[in-house]
Image (spheres, grey):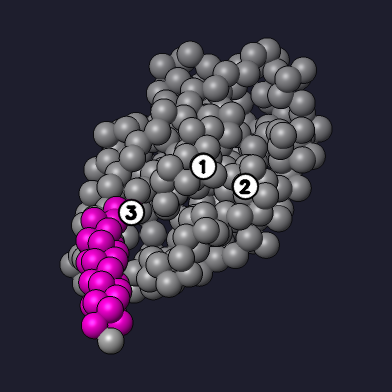
């Protein structure tokens, strides 16, 4: 009988110890977040800071910003579960989902991402007024893995019977949308293709003069960016993250600030099927490996 009580007491102690360890581990849990570097590192960090604070308050856990050097690194860090939440473009989501064997889950997207667009820009005095005028000219895309800065602009060029690799004098990759604007404004290239949201931000902030650098072509709409997680993340945490984004309200000071920085009217739920068109475009352009 005494032995039974001793064993029971030890068992209770082990259970309590495990519970304490579990609680401590949970208390120390960190949500690691990254984003494709489609803008400068300082701009990405500035945009994320209030969102990170908001997520910490909603999730009850520390949120840590994890910058990456390029689009491929953003894909690999989520696929290998070195980060927990990633801001992807449509193409990087497709790449990550293919790499992970279908185990990347897009949680939310901005309302704007249902009908996203790219713009082609040029010097206002270049004489370039339509896609066909790009033949024999130099053009800068953004990153090679960018949806709005490469894949979709390339797709629209191909649809217009223009092969960037054979019909243009030279194709360059700036690495980011703001760098594409700078390349066109400085005359390094004749034209550039980029995300319409970054272009509109630069115009609004008077960082570019549309009288000197103009938009000469705007694409038809397509699905783009989303916040994604790995499917191995506990379902309860996935739902809490989704709910936090969906709860952002522009009528509140905090919601207005965060949504403004994210260039979003609001966040809405999304699903993998929304990006089937992006996947098809990538396969058609020979960019999905």
Q: Residues within 10 Å of mark 2 (few under 14, many from 20)?
A: some
* Callout 3 secondary element: strand
In this rendering, would 185 be left or right of 127?
left
First in sequence: mark 1 or mark 2?
A: 1
First in sequence: mark 2 or mark 3?
A: 3
Against 252, residue 92 (above or below) is: above
Question: Residue 157 at what x, y percent from top left?
Answer: 72, 34
Res. 80 mark: 1
Magenta stretch in the rendered image: 2-31
**Residue at screen point 55% across, 66% down:** 270
Question: Residue 81 at what x, y percent from top left?
Answer: 47, 46
| Magenta span includes 277 | no
User: Foreground residue, 258 or 135?
Assistant: 258
Circle 3 residue = 31
Total marks placed: 3
In this rendering, would 225 be left or right of 280?
left
The image quadrant where one finds the C terminus is top right
Cα–Cα gap, marks 1 and 3: 15 Å
Question: Residue 67 at what x, y percent from top left?
Answer: 35, 36
């Amino acid at each position: 009988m005494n032995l039974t009580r001793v064993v029971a007491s030890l068992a209770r102690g082990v259970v309590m110890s495990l519970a304490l360890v579990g609680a401590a581990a949970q208390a120390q849990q960190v949500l690691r977040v990254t984003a494709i570097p489609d803008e400068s590192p300082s701009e990405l960090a500035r945009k994320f800071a209030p969102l990170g604070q908001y997520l910490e308050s909603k999730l009850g856990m520390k949120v840590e910003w994890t910058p990456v050097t390029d689009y491929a690194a953003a894909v690999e860090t989520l696929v290998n579960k070195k980060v927990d939440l990633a801001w992807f473009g449509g193409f990087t989501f497709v790449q990550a989902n293919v790499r992970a064997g279908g185990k990347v889950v897009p949680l939310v997207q901005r309302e704007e991402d249902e009908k996203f667009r790219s713009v082609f820009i040029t010097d206002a005095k270049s004489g370039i007024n339509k896609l066909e005028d790009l033949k024999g000219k130099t053009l800068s895309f953004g990153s090679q893995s960018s949806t709005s800065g490469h894949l979709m602009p390339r797709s629209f060029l191909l649809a217009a019977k223009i092969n960037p690799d054979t019909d243009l004098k030279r194709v360059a990759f700036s690495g980011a949308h703001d760098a594409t604007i700078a390349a066109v404004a400085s005359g390094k290239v004749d034209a550039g293709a980029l995300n319409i949201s970054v272009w509109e931000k630069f115009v609004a902030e008077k960082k570019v003069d549309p009288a000197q650098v103009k938009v000469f072509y705007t694409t038809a709409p397509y699905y783009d960016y989303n916040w994604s997680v790995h499917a191995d993340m506990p379902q309860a945490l996935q739902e809490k993250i989704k709910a936090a984004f969906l709860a952002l309200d522009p009528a509140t000071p905090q919601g207005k600030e965060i949504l403004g920085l994210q260039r979003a009217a609001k966040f809405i739920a999304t699903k993998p099927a929304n990006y089937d068109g992006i996947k098809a475009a990538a396969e058609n352009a020979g960019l999905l490996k």
